[in-house]
Image (cartoon, rainbow, N blue to C red):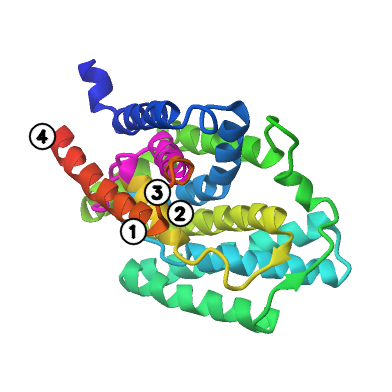
């Protein structure tokens, strides 16, 4: 039990199980069904994938506030490409490439120009949102999905392909983080960038790769968002970056860098979905849900402090 307690993902997993069982008892007729469980997994897919990229950025000691704008821009790019006659695959690749380039810019400005990640990504958040509105003419874009809608569509209790994609990316991310040299370098930089540089870790290159990876994952999440909405919406995903940061923090990540896990980020994202869905099932107003979410983040940070002691 002591070994489990030291794991950064154990607390979020335990809290997830407790909260899920609580809502099962409070709303057994609607919340406890298999269909509701699969619906929550479907709703978590976009946040889970973006939280995966955010976990790597926070492990590095950085932050990325451009996630929500990147998802919105991806949906607009995909819709525009489909309107122009591109196939679903080409449109999806263009959508993924766009925020990936934005991530590379974030990495360059952070690593080479030595600008604080908060300021860099705050700026790109506004830039990407502006580009999305410009491409869309400040309105939603309707487009024939050409098969992309199948990524997030499923009948009954079956899981869509997007959920399995999120799980697969999480497995790859966990393997990369825990078994590769690059993963160890990310943790080393987040723990102490100066010491990592003295030890020969290529800090600038790793920073560039991590922000580029986060951008690509944002693009994948944006494709799934388009699959769900089947429109390009430049005003979509406002506040998504805060949900991702909260998921990583709830999952045991430290904003100081060097601590966190892929599993913890996923449990944190699912935990927030369970809270929102459960509150809706028992009739809790939205404004109360926001208060509860904020309180949970603060409590998670307090528990993290106690666990590290």
Instruction: Specify which label sits upstream in the sequence, 2 or 3.
Output: 2
> Closest to the observer: 224 or 206?
224
Q: Is residue 263 magenta?
A: yes
Residue at (54% x, 33% y) in the render = 30
Q: Quadrant of the C terminus?
A: top left
- Count of marks, rendered view: 4
- Tag nearer the camera, 1 or 3: 3
Instruction: Specify which label sits upstream in the sequence, 4 or 3.
Output: 3
Residue 208 shown left or right of residue 94 in the figure: left
> Closest to the observer: 269 or 98?
269
Where does label 1 land, which residue? 62
Badge 3 element: loop
Residue 196 shown left or right of residue 159 in the figure: left
Q: Position of residue 19 (x, y in %)?
A: 36, 32
Please tell me how crowded label 2 is: few (under 14), some (14-19), or many (20+) other residues with Cα within 10 Å.
Answer: many
C-alpha gap between disc 4 and disc 2: 29 Å
- Tag nearer the camera, 1 or 2: 1
Residue 282, above or below 60: above
Furthest residue toward top? 1
Q: Which residues are magenta?
A: 250-277
C-alpha gap between disc 2 and disc 3: 38 Å
Q: Quadrant of residue 36?
A: top right
The reply to whether discs 1 and 2 touch (Cβ–Cβ < 8 Å) is: yes
């Amino acid at each position: 039990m002591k070994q489990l307690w030291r794991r950064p993902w154990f607390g979020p997993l335990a809290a997830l199980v407790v909260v899920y069982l609580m809502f099962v008892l409070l709303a057994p007729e609607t919340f406890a069904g298999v269909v509701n469980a699969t619906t929550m997994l479907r709703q978590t897919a976009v946040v889970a994938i973006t939280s995966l990229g955010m976990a790597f950025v926070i492990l590095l000691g950085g932050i990325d506030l451009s996630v929500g704008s990147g998802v919105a821009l991806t949906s607009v790019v995909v819709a525009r490409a489909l309107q122009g006659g591109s196939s679903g695959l080409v449109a999806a690749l263009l959508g993924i490439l766009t925020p990936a380039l934005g991530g590379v810019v974030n990495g360059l400005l952070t690593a080479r120009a030595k600008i604080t990640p908060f300021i860099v990504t705050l700026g790109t958040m506004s830039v990407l949102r502006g580009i999305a509105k410009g491409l869309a003419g400040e309105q939603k874009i309707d487009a024939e999905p050409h098969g992309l809608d199948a990524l997030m569509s499923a009948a009954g209790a079956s899981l869509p392909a997007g959920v399995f994609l999120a799980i697969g990316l999480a497995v790859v991310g966990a393997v990369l983080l825990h078994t590769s040299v690059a993963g160890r370098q990310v943790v080393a930089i987040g723990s102490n960038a100066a010491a990592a540089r003295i030890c020969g870790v290529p800090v600038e290159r790793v920073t560039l790769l991590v922000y580029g990876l986060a951008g690509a994952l944002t693009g994948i999440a944006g494709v799934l968002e388009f699959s769900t909405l089947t429109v390009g919406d430049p005003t979509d995903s406002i506040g998504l970056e805060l949900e991702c940061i909260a998921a990583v923090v709830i999952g045991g990540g430290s904003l100081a860098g060097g601590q966190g896990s892929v599993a913890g980020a996923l449990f944190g994202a699912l935990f927030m979905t369970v809270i929102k869905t459960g509150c809706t099932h028992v009739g809790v107003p939205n404004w109360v849900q926001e208060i509860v979410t904020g309180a949970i983040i603060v409590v998670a940070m307090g528990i993290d402090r106690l666990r590290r002691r």
